[in-house]
Image (cartoon, helix red, strand yellow):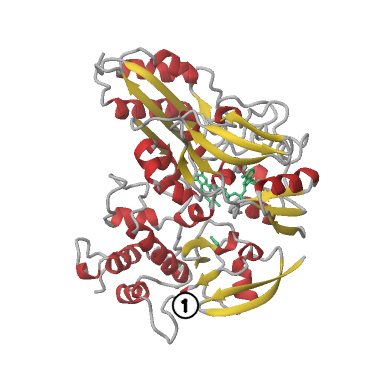
Amino acid sequence: MDKRISLLVDGEERTLTVDTRTTLLDSLRDRLGVTSPKKGCDHGQCGACTVLLGGRRVNSCLVLAVAHDGAEVVTAAGLGGGGGELHPVQEAFLARDALQCGFCTPGQVCSAVGMLQEAATGQPSHVTADPGRAVELDDAEIRERMSGNLCRCGAYVNIVAAIRDAADPGRTSGTASAGARP
Amino acid sequence: MRPFDYQQAPDATAAVATVARRPGAMFLGGGTNLVDLMKLGVATPELLVDVSRLPLDTVAELPDGRVRIGAAVPNSDLAAHPLILQRYPVLSQALLSGASGQLRNLATTGGNLLQRTRCPYFQDASLPCNKREPGSGCPARGGYSRNHAILGASDSCVAVHPSDMAVALAALDATVVILGPGGERTLPLTELHRLPGAEPERDTVLAHGELVTAVDLPPGSHRRSAYRKVRDRASFAFALVSVAAVVELADDGGTIAGVRIALGGVAHKPWRAERAEELLRGAQPTETNFGRAAAAELDAAVALAGNAFKIPLAANAMVAVLRDLTGRGGNG
Ligand SMILES: Cc1cc2nc3c(=O)[nH]c(=O)nc-3n(C[C@H](O)[C@H](O)[C@H](O)COP(=O)(O)OP(=O)(O)OC[C@H]3O[C@@H](n4cnc5c(N)ncnc54)[C@H](O)[C@@H]3O)c2cc1C
Ligand code: FES
Ligand code: FES
């Protein structure tokens, strides 16, 4: 069954007709040619498809496009706001070499951007000792909050380091320098 | 995936009316379980009625001191809500131990309660499963049974309910508000889900078309409460066993005035540990008493080939939670 919807994708108004079965991920990749979100598992288990939907990180493979007519979607390609600029999280991933094959990376960076906002608004995580207080993003917090993003190359050490840098740009060398480039 | 139509319900009454009169219609929350099951061919709705945008998206204190959680509140918002953090920490902990940040942003209170089992045979439409295809058999018995039930299972089904949130709600004595074609009714959360018996295809007592509109938490502060989840990896995994407990100590601290315990990962529903509670009420908070209560609760447990480890694991997890909550557990 076809429905006509419009989406604001990476700042651009896009209108399309979708079969109700189409996920947001497939709409972006196959219908709109926005291929930065990746399809790893298609079942919510890997995080490669993570985008910001209405400003919140979600798995676009489990979202029906038809249920989000009019929504704002930001993918890794749009995080920097256009004009080839990179988001600070993306800069940090580059600086820390936080990837190998890069397949999980668009999902990782979108997830990290969403996660940093969640932490900034005080949302606790499973490892937060004192929920309700301001969140301090140490490595345990970053790992827990990013556990929905798998990396088959195992680039986790540098991913955590990159996010630590992005969370607190003043603390680049930090406590754990395991992730620093040689 | 089978073709289906999609509608956004203008209000809860209309959503109920639409689904109730169409046998092939289903409610859609965040879709994190339903869309997955539709991809797998396990769920084949003809019509999805989206209830995630209904104005059931608030957490608020009622005049009598109860706290009402709307069915459309995202799991992430609920876990971070000040009322929940202050008064019902066990609920926030349970939510935050479940799924991932991305999934919790989509998942709703109603959908979380109504999510289906993660039994691999249920999720594989090419295999028999009494829950999916009544009468077809249960390959989990004698098959892969590591994640399956040790309490309250039946010959026809050994599946467990996967929700962490529901286990905390069971320990909190929450109430579910349900809207049906004939009006509203309420149920204790512990009576929403059912044991499989001979009808494992029915997870809950809800009739087709009944909508969960809210979950109510009892008044007062339940600060001495906690959720402990044991799983195969430190994060983003379903529970092998989990324990939610709410404890009240007598004023002198020497005895347990009130205690409510629920277990997850062990049964077809959140398992209220009533035998353990009974033994602990009025007792001293000692390691011996905790162990005795846990053993009594698990006395009826029956292991399958792959999950015998769950029995001592559940007992130990219960003792550990009670010890943490009472700051006790010395000898005695
Ligand atoms: C990879 C992965 C890991 C996960 N890990 C965990 C975990 O560790 N712990 C855990 O607890 N959960 C876990 N989950 C499950 C997750 O919590 C559920 O998928 C989610 O809570 C379902 O909510 P939803 O709003 O997306 O429901 P939906 O998928 O929209 O709906 C689920 C069911 O509920 C029905 N429904 C929805 N709303 C209502 C309502 N208001 N009234 C009546 N019926 C309704 C639907 O018809 C459907 O049958 C995981 C899921 C995934 C994909
Ligand atoms: S592709 Fe969406 S989570 Fe794996
Ligand atoms: S860099 Fe290859 S999967 Fe993460």
Relative depth, front residue between B45 and B19: B19
Q: Which residue is at a point 41% across and 69% down the rendered structure image?
A: A109
Q: Position of residue B60 (x, y in %)?
A: 46, 42
For the image, the number of numbered tags is 1
Q: Is residue B277 left or right of residue B325?
A: right
* Residue A141 lies in quadrant: bottom left
Visible in this render: residue B1? Answer: no
Task: Look at mark 1 in the image and give the residue it sits on.
Answer: A78
Relative depth, front residue between B209 and B184: B184
Q: Quadrant of ligand 3?
A: bottom left
Visible in this render: residue B116? Answer: yes
Q: Position of residue B68 (x, y in %)?
A: 50, 39
Q: Which residue is at a point 56% across and 45% down the rendered structure image?
A: B71
Q: Is residue B11 left or right of residue B257?
A: right
Q: Amino acid at mark 1?
A: Gly
Relative depth, front residue between B288 and A152: B288
Q: Position of residue B232 (x, y in %)?
A: 44, 43
Residue B131 lies, with reference to residue B296, above or below; the image says below
* Residue B4 lies in quadrant: bottom right
Q: Position of residue B47 (x, y in %)?
A: 75, 54
